[in-house]
Amino acid sequence: CACAPAPTQLLATGLFPSAPIRPTLAVDVRVLEFAMKLFVRIAPNNTAWTSTLESFLDGLGFTLEHEVCLV
């Protein structure tokens, strides 16, 4: 078959294959980017989660218009 291998096809669509040969699972590259940003910002409090989520969504073109203060 002249088709590209499954991992190559998955990468072309923005999915990261679980294995280089016959992958059975793929993860959206944006989710991997989110995890990377989370681990860069991880701290022993909840600020890491909200900061990472805001940064991740901003990178996708979304913006949060309102902030809620729970204090």
Image: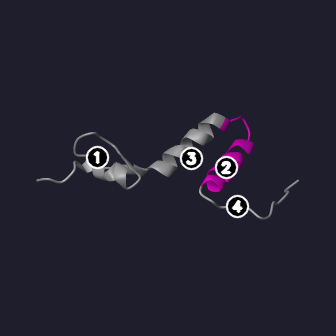
Task: Check disc 3 and report the residue beneath it.
Answer: 34
Residue carrying label 1: 7
Residue ID at (14%, 53%)? 2
* Alpha carbon separation for disc pair 2 and 3: 9 Å
The mark nearer the N terminus, 3 or 4, is: 3
Q: Earlier in the sequence, mark 2 or mark 1?
A: 1
The amino acid type, in three-letter code, at marker 4 is Thr
Query: Which one is nearer the viewer's eye here, 28 or 48?
Result: 28
Per the image, label 4 sits on a secondary structure element best described as loop
- Of all residues shown, which one is farthest toward the front? 2
First in sequence: mark 3 or mark 1? 1
Q: CA separation, marks 3 and 1?
A: 21 Å
Task: Calculate the distance from the C-alpha at mark 2 to the C-alpha at mark 1.
Answer: 28 Å
Q: Amino acid at mark 3?
A: Phe
Specify few, some or many for label 2: CA neighbours under 10 Å numbering under 14, 14-19, or 20 or more. Answer: some
Q: Amino acid at mark 2?
A: Ser
Kindly indicate the quadrant of the structure image that contains residue 36.
Answer: top right
